[in-house]
Image (cartoon, rainbow, N blue to C red):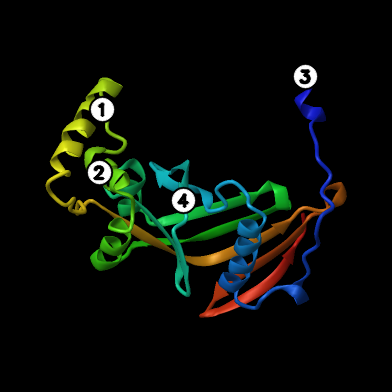
Amino acid sequence: MNIGELRQDYKKETLDEKDVNQNPIEQFKLWFNEAIISKLLEPNAFCLSTIHNNSPESRIVLLKEINDNGFVFFTNYNSAKGKQISINNNVSLNFLWLELERQVRIEGVAEKISALESDIYFYSRPIGSQIGAIVSEQSEIIESRSILEEALNIAEQKYKIEKPIRPEHWGGYIVKPRLIEFWQGRSSRLHDRISFELVDGSWMISRLSP
């Protein structure tokens, strides 16, 4: 197989400056809703990149809220990404919706949301997910899968009687954007790229060369 010959010509949609919402978060909501309506698998999945020793580290996480201030996800604060954010909270997010020939790239800063907001989301999760968050020491080395399963079994018995309590080291981050770029695939690799950059509290819109 010649990987260099793998290519797809994009022809579904166009993206023009005059057609986008002047608020990039509102424009994101429009595209995100279209991804949901199109019944894409995990439309809220995105690649989160953090900084570790001046090098990027990336992983896929799930978006759980969009509000006027930014984009919210949840994790273990003691995980690798949590520790990295505590040192350098500059992060990037990348959403890819291939079926719509679209991606959105976001740069911003990650900040912890309030304990109350984390509680509200934690207790809205299925009981199994609550227990999983309690049991998992995310990113720590474990000797075997069986150790994790044993801890889970013990916790499941315990929480048949008691109500789980959200661990203090588990909660949400909001990513407050300073740059949001919308990418729409176009034919012959002449893609549409519309960038929003926050300058002195206002969003500046630019078209970028593909």
Q: Residues within 10 Å of mark 2 (few under 14, many from 20)?
A: many
Q: Quadrant of residue 139?
A: top left
- Of the residues tagged 4 and 3, which is closer to the observer? 4
Residue 182 placement (x, y as % from top left): 67, 61
| Residue beneath the point at 50% across and 54% down | 92
| Residue beneath the point at 16% across and 52% down | 163
Q: Report the amino acid beneath label 4.
A: Leu
Look at the numbered disc 2 and give the secondary structure of its residue: helix
Residue topped by disc 1: 149
N-terminal of the two: label 4 or label 3?
A: 3
N-terminal of the two: label 1 or label 3?
A: 3
Q: Report the amino acid beneath label 2.
A: Ile
- Of the residues tagged 1 and 4, which is closer to the observer? 1
Q: Is residue 187 above or below residue 182?
A: above
| Residue beneath the point at 21% across and 54% down | 166
Q: CA distance from mark 1 to mark 4?
A: 24 Å
Q: Report the amino acid beneath label 1.
A: Glu
- Mark 1 in CB contact with mark 4 (< 8 angstroms): no
Q: Is residue 91 above or below residue 145?
A: below
Look at the numbered disc 3 and give the secondary structure of its residue: loop
N-terminal of the two: label 2 or label 4?
A: 4
Q: Which mark is residue 1?
A: 3
N-terminal of the two: label 1 or label 4?
A: 4
Residue topped by disc 2: 131
User: Relative to 166, is 87 on the left or the right?
Assistant: right
